[in-house]
Image: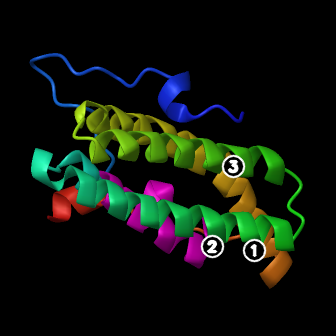
Amino acid sequence: MSQDIYHTAQAPQASANTAPPTLEWSDAFLLGYGPMDRTHQEFVECVQALQSATEAEMLERLQGFAAHAEKHFGEEDQWMRETEFPARECHIDEHAAVLASVREVMAEVEQGRTANVQRLAAELVRWFPGHADYLDSALAHWMCKQRLGGKPVIIRRNAASNASAA
């Protein structure tokens, strides 16, 4: 699990007639541990900013994403270590792989090569939902049990109801 995501998977390729995949925040990403949910919403916003970056904005947006990811993953890694979360090594390794990919692409951008920024963003779009559904949801459950004595309670708005109300 220590390989970076940039090299281990091909990002979805958009055809000339389709837009690249995007990541939109929704209640489906809620895991029931407030600090994690807020950080995940910020993650989605950072990926969106990266995807919409112009050539001139790519380095700044990538640096912003990197700063967010360092803090985000560092906080989760600390929670896992402090509470002796059983699956922490795999989870920490996955965070490290993402950060390695970000650093590699940032080094390219600093040298004027921006071609892989959108590929990285597309891979983050692909990676995040599964990571949140499996590894982060287990951590959220663990954190609620450790800190609050029970399972998280998650109340999600009905997306269909929200769409018709708008």
Q: Which mark is residue 73?
A: none
With 67 as the anchor, is 12 left or right in this view?
left
**Which stretch did the figure color magenta?**
26-47
Q: Tags 2 and 1 in contact by the CB under 8 Å rule? A: yes
Q: Is residue 143 above or below residue 27?
A: below
Image point (74%, 55%), residue name = 138
Residue 150: name its quadrant. bottom right
Residue that mark 2 sits on: 33
Amino acid beneath label 2: Tyr
Lower position in the chain sequence, tag 1 or tag 3: 3
Q: Secondary structure at mark 1?
A: helix
Image point (13%, 45%), residue name = 55
Amino acid beneath label 3: Leu
Lower position in the chain sequence, tag 2 or tag 1: 2
Viewer-proximal residue among 132 and 74: 74
Residue that mark 3 sits on: 135
